[in-house]
């Protein structure tokens, strides 16, 4: 079994906001399971072969193996991968689906489109925005997101100085500077069923002569995520990652708080990345699109029976104390460990004989103490600098408290 990768990030307290984070990575298994349960196979179809259906997509959801057939014109591909939590599909420039997925916000109602004044005139900034619907991300329902000038959306609850590391939706994360041109904007559209962020005619910092980029990320109420690329003037592989990470995909993580007095306060809050989908950036060109379709998660099951009979590949388990179905690897990991859910092996019939309300009316952790720093911010629009700011003084250009950084 190939071990999963857990990205370990230690948050610092307010007193150390000049550096903001310690960063290191660790390699771990997931209780004997793979964290990233997918692999990819490519099959080339000869241009002499006649395929009546044009392009075929073959998938094996249980095993995660996929085959990719080259289109007849040998120029574009539909690439599909299964990543346990999502299926991703990349559509080439000649695909009708790529055109369908692009949302022209210039054609939308003016009252539903907003130009973000701060982000459109700054560099390496991020701003909190409230959605009009609950967006399911890795099975968690989110109402607030953070839009960054660097071509991505931060999906975490706690704003910190490593926004580019994890918990993101990134159509094209790079060192974009919307303040370079008055024609560059960061706009967003919201009609109650889809939320779209568009980085419009933005330029790379210190590479402005290359040309402008226009691309978007759309979050649908059913959990689908779509990346659309209108103008990509150069190959993404040619964009330098020196001053800012360059990547495309999605990622999520959970936070763990260690209340032990033996652990320094600066290391008590830890973020673990439990899943990531990295797109092949060579496929990202003008007029292409990517669609992420959510797969069933453990969190959606509301009863022990549903949880135990789940056919997902995530090894769902039922925790009677929390009345929750989980794989143990999601944003509720702290509670899952604190209440001893990893030790529960009872069958559903055992739970049915007890009153769940009596079990959950007083949720006292097994170790007698429970603390977390995952409180959600409730301000409509908050602005902060992302972690790629090279020269930054504590508190500069910040309009949110530094306590949880």
Image (tube, rainbow, N blue to C red):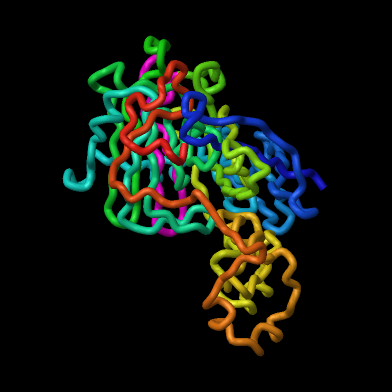
Residue located farthest toward the left when viewing the structure as drawn? 111
Q: Say which of 253 and 220 sits in front.
A: 253
Q: Is residue 118 above or below residue 371?
A: above
Q: Residue at x 61, y 68 (%)?
A: 325
Residue 142 point in image, percent of width and height: 42, 54
Q: Is residue 106 left or right of residue 74?
A: left
Q: How many labels, in total? A: 0
Q: Residue at x 39, y 41 (%)?
A: 146
Query: Is 283 a magenta residue?
Result: no
Residue located farthest toward the front when viewing the structure as drawn? 261
Q: Say which of 350 and 53 sits in front.
A: 350
Q: Is residue 118 left or right of residue 349?
A: left
Q: Is residue 355 above or below residue 210?
A: below
Q: Is residue 82 visible?
A: no
Q: Is residue 278 above or below residue 65?
A: above
Residue extent of the magenta highlight: 210-233
| Secondary structure that dominates the magenta span | strand
Q: Is residue 385 visible?
A: yes
Residue 111 point in image, percent of width and height: 17, 46
Residue 238 point in image, percent of width and height: 54, 17
């Amino acid at each position: 079994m190939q071990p999963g990768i857990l990205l370990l990030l230690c948050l610092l307290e307010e007193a150390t906001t000049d550096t903001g984070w310690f960063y290191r990575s660790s390699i771990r298994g997931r209780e004997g399971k793979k964290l990233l349960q997918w692999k990819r196979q490519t099959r080339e179809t000869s241009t002499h072969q006649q395929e009546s259906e044009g392009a075929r997509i073959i998938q094996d959801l249980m095993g995660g193996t996929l085959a990719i057939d080259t289109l007849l014109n040998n120029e574009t591909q539909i690439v599909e991968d299964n990543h346990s939590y999502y299926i991703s599909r990349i559509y080439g420039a000649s695909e009708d689906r790529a055109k369908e997925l692009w949302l022209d916000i210039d054609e939308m109602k003016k009252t539903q489109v907003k130009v973000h004044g701060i982000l459109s005139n700054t560099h390496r900034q991020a701003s909190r925005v409230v959605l009009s619907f609950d967006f399911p991300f890795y099975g968690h329902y989110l109402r607030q997101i953070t839009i960054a000038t660097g071509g991505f959306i931060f999906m975490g609850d706690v704003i910190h100085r490593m926004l580019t590391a994890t918990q993101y939706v990134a159509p094209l994360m790079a060192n974009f500077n919307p303040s370079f041109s008055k024609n560059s904007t960061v706009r967003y559209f919201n009609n109650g069923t889809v939320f779209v962020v568009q980085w419009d005619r933005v330029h790379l910092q210190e590479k402005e002569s290359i040309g402008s980029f226009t691309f978007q990320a759309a979050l649908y109420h059913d959990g689908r995520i779509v990346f659309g690329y209108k103008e990509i003037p150069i190959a993404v592989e040619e964009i330098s990652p020196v001053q800012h990470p360059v990547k495309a995909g999605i990622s999520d993580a959970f936070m763990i708080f260690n209340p032990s007095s033996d652990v320094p306060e600066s290391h008590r809050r830890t973020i673990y990345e439990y899943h990531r989908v990295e797109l092949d950036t060579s496929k990202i060109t003008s007029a292409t699109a990517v669609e992420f379709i959510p797969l069933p998660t453990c969190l959606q099951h509301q009863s022990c029976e549903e949880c135990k009979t789940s056919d997902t590949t995530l090894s769902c388990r039922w925790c009677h104390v929390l009345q929750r179905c989980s794989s143990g690897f999601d944003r509720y990991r702290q509670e899952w460990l604190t209440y001893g859910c990893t030790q529960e092996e009872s069958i559903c019939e055992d739970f049915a004989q007890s009153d769940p309300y009596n079990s959950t009316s007083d949720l006292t952790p097994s170790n007698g103490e429970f603390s977390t720093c995952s409180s959600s911010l409730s301000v409509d629009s908050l602005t902060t600098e992302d972690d790629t700011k090279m020269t930054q003084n504590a508190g500069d250009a910040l309009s949110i408290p530094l306590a949880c950084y």
